[in-house]
């Protein structure tokens, strides 16, 4: 008997090393912040990775994004970070369920440990007959997947994938979020665009 898992959603995880995370943390904490209420706060600067402090991190993000897309079989000329910002969440603050529109892939680099990120199963949007399922250890039945990030973790995922940040119960969470678009000629012959 064989089982084939069709059309999976793949996310990329990699622990990055050799960064002075305390410098990144200080930069974000000393930035102008937009207080988002229960959704935490974000920097008003939306190209934070263009700052020279983050040059090597930006290169690592782009290099790992290329690795991720090549593993998925995507064809592209190059990639560019369209926007990037710092996030700050205090205890009991999270981010509502959302996706990143007008983007190709998105991700987050964790400057500190902190509250988990939860990815939603995109197949839940498909309407049809719904059975009762045993959700214990069978990943095929999960409604969501929760990841407890550690400082230095890079996470990359399709921009359309719904996700949220669960409220932290223990400490603040500082991260750098980003969106990536293709650069140059992109797409099949009859639908090609130049970005």
Image (tube, helix red, strand yellow):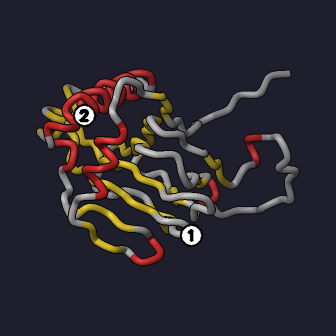
Q: Mark 1 or mark 2, which is nearer the start of the sequence?
A: 2
Q: Is residue 167 above or below residue 20?
A: below
Q: Which residue is mark 2?
A: 58
Residue pictured at 30% horizontal, 27% vertical: 60
Q: Is residue 55 visible?
A: yes
The number of discs equals 2
Crowd class of label 1 (few under 14; some 14 to 19; many from 20; radius 10 Å): some
User: In which quadrant of the rendered view does residue 33 lie?
Assistant: bottom left
Residue 147 relative to residue 106: left or right? right
Q: Position of residue 63 (x, y in %)?
A: 30, 24
Give 18 or 72, whichever is nearer the viewer: 18
- On the image, the x and y values in percent for residue 34 come to 28, 71
* Residue in front for this viewpoint, 7 or 52: 52
Q: Quadrant of residue 186?
A: top left
- For the residue pair 72 and 146, the one nearer the viewer reads as 146
- Label number found at residue 92: 1
Q: Position of residue 36 (x, y in %)?
A: 37, 74
Q: Quadrant of the C terminus?
A: top left
Q: Residue 50 vs residue 23: left or right?
A: left
Separation of residues labelled 2 and 1 (CA atoms): 30 Å
């Amino acid at each position: 008997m064989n089982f084939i898992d069709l059309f999976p959603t793949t996310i990329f995880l990699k622990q990055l090393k050799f960064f002075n995370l305390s410098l990144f943390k200080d930069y974000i904490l000393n930035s102008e912040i937009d207080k988002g209420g229960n959704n935490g706060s974000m920097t008003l600067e939306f190209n934070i990775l263009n700052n020279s402090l983050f040059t090597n991190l930006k290169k690592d993000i782009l290099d790992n994004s290329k690795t991720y897309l090549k593993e998925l079989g995507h064809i592209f000329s190059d990639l560019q970070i369209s926007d990037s910002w710092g996030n700050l969440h205090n205890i009991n603050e999270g981010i509502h369920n959302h996706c990143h529109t007008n983007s190709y892939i998105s991700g987050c680099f964790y400057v500190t440990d902190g509250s988990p990120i939860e990815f939603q199963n995109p197949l839940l949007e498909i309407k049809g007959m719904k059975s009762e399922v045993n959700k214990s250890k069978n990943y095929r039945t999960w409604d969501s997947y929760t990841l407890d990030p550690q400082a230095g973790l890079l996470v990359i995922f399709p921009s359309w994938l719904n996700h949220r940040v669960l409220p932290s119960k223990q400490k603040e969470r500082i991260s750098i979020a980003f969106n990536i678009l293709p650069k140059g000629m992109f797409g099949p012959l009859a639908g090609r665009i130049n970005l």
